[in-house]
Image: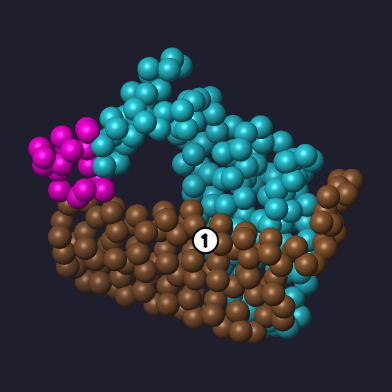
């Protein structure tokens, strides 16, 4: 494995770990439920993305051939993470009526 | 484009994706790929988009989303590290013009995956997406940005 690939893998892993760490920190420090819900999307996108990119790059050099299969989990995360965030937000909204800002005459905004 | 042409397009796309994901190409994996791709096309065709996708638009959309994910990750990270208790959250309703469900789902997923915005509810009656924004000074600008950056490309997606 060439030197520059080693450096790329290391940088990707560190950036991914930092994204996950800051996302966790955000979940602890942000003030209320809805703002806290924003924090895990960082770990799900940049965190998982960088870690899996590092994996794919490393095994491209170790095994040869196409290593795109190591990016499959990213596809699953990108498809499933919005669903769980969506369900949590809906559950919160069931108890807290909401009025959005550019209000296009929507009486259904408050359930 | 004809129905059978679309079938062949999906079949070839799936088969090439299968080979790429498999890593080393071999006769066995190529044959298995033919069976799997044929099975998916035969069983799932009614659920697959029945119009031709413009690949260039899809690539531009993917690149734009990846760039925005990285950029907004940085801005949200900065926000979390500097002033987590003084965010300016807002609820924004984004009126949409997307005609079909699959593109509404794609837009909602993109909005959630971009840190700083979460899609919460799609109001089918008024065709508007309710979005929660983590920190913004002008909520109307966020709605306009979602429309110009993502919805415009999604509208061009099908040929």
Q: Residues within 10 Å of mark 1 (few under 14, many from 20)?
A: some
For the N terminus of chain A, the image quarter is: bottom left
Q: Is residue B11 left or right of residue B29?
A: right
Q: Is residue B5 above or below residue B80?
A: above
Q: Which chain is brown?
A: A
For the C terminus of chain A, the image quarter is: bottom right
Q: Is residue B95 above or below residue A62?
A: above
Dividing the picture into quarters, in which one does residue B76 lie?
A: bottom right
Please say which color scheme the image uses.
Answer: by chain
Q: Is residue B21 left or right of residue B150?
A: left
Q: Which chain is cyan?
A: B
Magenta stretch, residue numbers = B19-35
Q: Nearer the viewer, residue A95 or A83?
A: A95
Give the residue drawn at x 32%, y 29%.
B11
Measuring from the top left, give residue B24's x and y in whole percent: 15, 48
Element under disc 1: helix
Q: Nearer the viewer, residue A31 or B75?
A: A31
In the rendered image, residue B47 lying in the magenta stretch gets the answer no
Give the residue drawn at x 15%, y 56%.
A64
In the rendered image, residue B20 lying in the magenta stretch gets the answer yes
Q: Is residue B68 left or right of residue B4?
A: right
Measuring from the top left, give residue B121's x and y in whole percent: 70, 53
One can see residue A73 in this view: yes
Residue ID for mark 1: A81
Q: Is residue A28 above or below residue B68?
A: below
One can see residue B117 in this view: no
Give the residue drawn at x 82%, y 62%.
A98
Count of numbered marks: 1
Dividing the picture into quarters, in which one does residue B119 lie?
A: bottom right
Measuring from the top left, give residue B54's x and y in whole percent: 49, 30
**Residue at the extreme top of the image, as rendered:** B2
């Amino acid at each position: 494995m060439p030197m520059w690939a080693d450096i790329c893998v290391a940088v990707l892993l560190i950036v991914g770990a930092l994204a996950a760490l800051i996302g966790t920190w955000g979940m602890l420090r942000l003030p209320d439920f809805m703002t806290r819900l924003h924090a895990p999307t960082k770990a799900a996108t940049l965190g998982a993305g960088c870690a899996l990119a590092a994996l794919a790059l490393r095994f491209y050099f170790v095994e040869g051939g196409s290593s795109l299969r190591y990016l499959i989990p990213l596809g699953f995360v990108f498809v499933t993470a919005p669903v769980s965030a969506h369900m949590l937000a809906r559950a919160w909204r069931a108890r807290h009526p909401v009025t959005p800002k550019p209000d296009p005459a929507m009486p259904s905004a408050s359930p | 484009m004809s129905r059978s042409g679309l079938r062949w397009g999906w079949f070839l796309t799936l088969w090439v994706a299968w080979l790429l994901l498999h890593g080393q190409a071999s006769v066995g994996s190529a044959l298995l790929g033919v069976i799997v791709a044929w099975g998916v096309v035969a069983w799932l065709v009614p659920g697959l988009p029945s119009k031709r996708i413009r690949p260039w638009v899809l690539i531009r959309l993917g690149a734009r989303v990846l760039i925005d994910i990285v950029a907004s990750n940085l801005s949200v990270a900065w926000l979390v590290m500097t002033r987590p208790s003084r965010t300016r959250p807002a609820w924004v309703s984004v009126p949409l013009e997307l005609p079909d469900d699959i593109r509404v789902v794609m837009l909602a997923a993109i909005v959630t995956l971009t840190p700083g915005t979460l899609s919460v509810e799609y109001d089918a009656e008024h065709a508007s997406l309710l979005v929660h924004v983590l920190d913004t000074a002008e909520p109307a600008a966020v709605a306009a940005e979602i429309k110009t950056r993502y919805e415009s490309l999604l509208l061009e997606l099908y040929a």
